[in-house]
Image: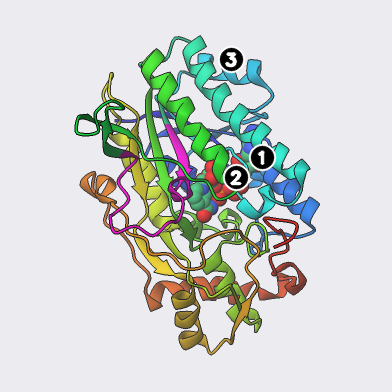
């Protein structure tokens, strides 16, 4: 069934290919973005490795190759509440996909300005969307799909798999520790940066609006996204997706691939013993489509899926790229304040039950990303690769 879908943050790394994927499936799409991400590139003196086109040109190119129109509203969802409310009220979306947050942990830790910007932007953005749905009386109509992060759980070693959002616990009586009752609570949050903290707070907004107003919400706890292109962005070079490699926005695997392409050592933070959850951008777009096409029922609690397909230790990824390309590994100080080594096991059956067939890391896929990195390596500014943001002034 064709749906009307509003994509908040539809010009970004995940938002753009998701918009194209949903449009290619025959859904009606409208993008909202304020282009803050493009301005952050200017602030940091860096650009996407790939030559991304202005959004108006991207939209035109998509119309040329697919025949589908994409709507566009340029507004700041954290500040322009009245416009957002009117857009939602007039457009009456079946689903809203919410990507529009500041998404870099290092960027959020650069200074008190960046911490405050991340909190203001992310919390107001999320809360404004929730308020606007309620104020338009669309609580039971519009399904909100939010991109959260695996980082909300914290990266602590556990003998158990991380559940999908909720943890069964036994609350013991204060008077008699023999007595207790079983219940399910949101898995205790443990943010590792200001960015991650905003995502843990988003979870409470969702819990409250679901409980109080009956909103239908899916919160996708996404792993680190790697890859660049999807089937749809490959239709035409004007549709190319962004590729971030700088010390603030570059995610680890894409950064290693770029480093290998330009002959820069693979910079491994600390011992590289951090285990992280990953997903390819092609699976990201599938997961979001599956979540939209299978909305939660009215009255259902906030649905949480761990949107991740595999876990890897960072130094193992570096070793893999080293073996494939010969690039040197270089161990550097870890700018973050985190456990030196951790194990990670994740429950991720929810999206697979809806039909996801995960793409996992393979030499073939890595080669594809390396080709993108190789093709555009002349655009790389090597001085921008190292991570300079520090979690504490004295690390
Ligand atoms: P991105 O920065 O590339 O895209 C975000 C988009 O939202 C940008 O186009 C930006 O201009 C827009 N935006 C931000 N604040 C806005 C506002 N107030 N009003 C209007 N537009 C605004 O980020 P991404 O990598 O596409 O990530 C999308 C979402 O997925 C984020 O919420 C992020 O936390 C989550 N996520 C991403 C990753 C990853 O590896 N990229 C991993 C886990 C979770």
Q: Is residue 290 left or right of residue 316?
A: left
Measured as percent of width and height from the top left, residue 269 is found at 59, 71
For the point 67% across and 52% down, the residue is: 53
Q: In the image, is residue 347 above or below residue 395?
A: above
The answer for how far apart the CA atoms under marks 1 and 3 are is 25 Å
Which region of the structure is painted magenta?
A: 145-166
Can residue 12 be seen by looking at this rendering? no
Tag 2's secondary structure? Answer: helix
Foreground pick, 290 / 343: 343
How crowded is the residue under tag 3: few (<14 C-alpha within 10 Å), some, or many (20+)?
some
Q: In the image, is residue 230 above or below residue 38?
A: below
Q: Earlier in the sequence, mark 1 or mark 2?
A: 1
Q: Report which residue position mark 3 lands on.
A: 86
The answer for how far apart the CA atoms under marks 2 and 3 are is 29 Å
Q: Is residue 24 left or right of residue 70?
A: left
Give the label on residue 155, or none. Answer: none
Front disc: 1 or 3: 1
Give the label on residue 195, or none. Answer: 2
Q: Quadrant of residue 80?
A: top right
Tag 1's secondary structure? Answer: helix
Q: Earlier in the sequence, mark 1 or mark 3?
A: 3
Measured as percent of width and height from the top left, residue 184 is found at 27, 32
Tag 3's secondary structure? Answer: helix
The answer for how far apart the CA atoms under marks 1 and 2 are is 6 Å
For the point 80% across and 51% down, the residue is: 43
For label 2, being within 8 Å of ligand 1 is answered: yes
Q: Report which residue position mark 1 lands on.
A: 118
- Quarter of the figure with the N terminus: top left
Query: In the rendered structure, does residue 159 fall within the stretch colored magenta?
Result: yes
Q: Do the CB atoms of the residues marked 1 and 2 lie less than 8 Å apart?
A: yes
């Amino acid at each position: 069934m064709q749906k009307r879908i509003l994509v908040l943050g539809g010009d970004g790394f995940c938002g753009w290919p998701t918009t194209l994927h949903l449009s290619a499936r025959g859904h009606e799409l409208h993008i909202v973005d304020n282009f803050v991400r493009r301005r952050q590139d200017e602030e940091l003196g860096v650009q996407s490795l790939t030559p991304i086109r202005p959004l108006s040109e991207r939209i035109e190119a998509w119309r040329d190759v697919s025949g589908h129109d994409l709507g566009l509203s340029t507004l700041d969802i954290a500040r322009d509440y009245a416009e957002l409310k009117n857009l939602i009220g007039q457009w009456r979306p079946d689903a809203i996909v919410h990507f529009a947050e500041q998404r870099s942990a290092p960027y959020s830790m650069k200074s008190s300005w960046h911490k405050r910007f991340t909190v203001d932007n992310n919390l107001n953005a999320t809360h404004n969307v929730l308020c606007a749905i309620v104020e338009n009386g669309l609580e039971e109509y519009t399904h909100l799909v939010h991109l959260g992060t695996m980082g909300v759980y914290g990266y602590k070693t556990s003998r158990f798999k991380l559940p999908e959002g909720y943890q069964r616990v036994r609350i013991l009586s204060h008077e008699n520790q023999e007595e207790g009752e079983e219940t399910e609570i949101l898995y205790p949050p443990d943010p590792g940066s200001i960015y991650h903290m905003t995502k843990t707070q988003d979870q409470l907004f969702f819990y409250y609006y679901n409980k109080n107003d009956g909103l239908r919400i899916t919160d996708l706890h996404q792993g680190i996204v790697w890859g660049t292109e999807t089937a749809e962005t490959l239709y035409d070079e004007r549709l190319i997706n962004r590729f971030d490699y700088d010390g603030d926005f570059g995610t680890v695997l894409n950064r290693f691939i770029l480093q290998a392409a330009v002959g820069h050592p693979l910079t491994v933070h600390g011992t590289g013993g951090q285990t992280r959850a990953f997903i390819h951008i092609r699976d990201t777009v599938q997961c979001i489509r599956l979540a939209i096409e299978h909305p939660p029922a009215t009255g259902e609690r906030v649905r949480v899926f761990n949107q991740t397909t595999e876990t890897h230790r960072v130094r193992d990824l570096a070793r893999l790229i080293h073996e494939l390309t010969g690039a040197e590994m270089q161990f550097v100080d870890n700018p973050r304040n985190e456990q030196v080594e951790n194990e990670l096991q994740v429950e991720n059956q929810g999206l697979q039950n809806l039909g996801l067939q995960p793409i996992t890391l393979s030499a073939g896929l890595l080669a594809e990303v390396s080709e993108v990195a190789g093709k555009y390596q002349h655009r790389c500014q090597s001085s921008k690769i190292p991570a300079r943001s520090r979690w504490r002034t004295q690390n």
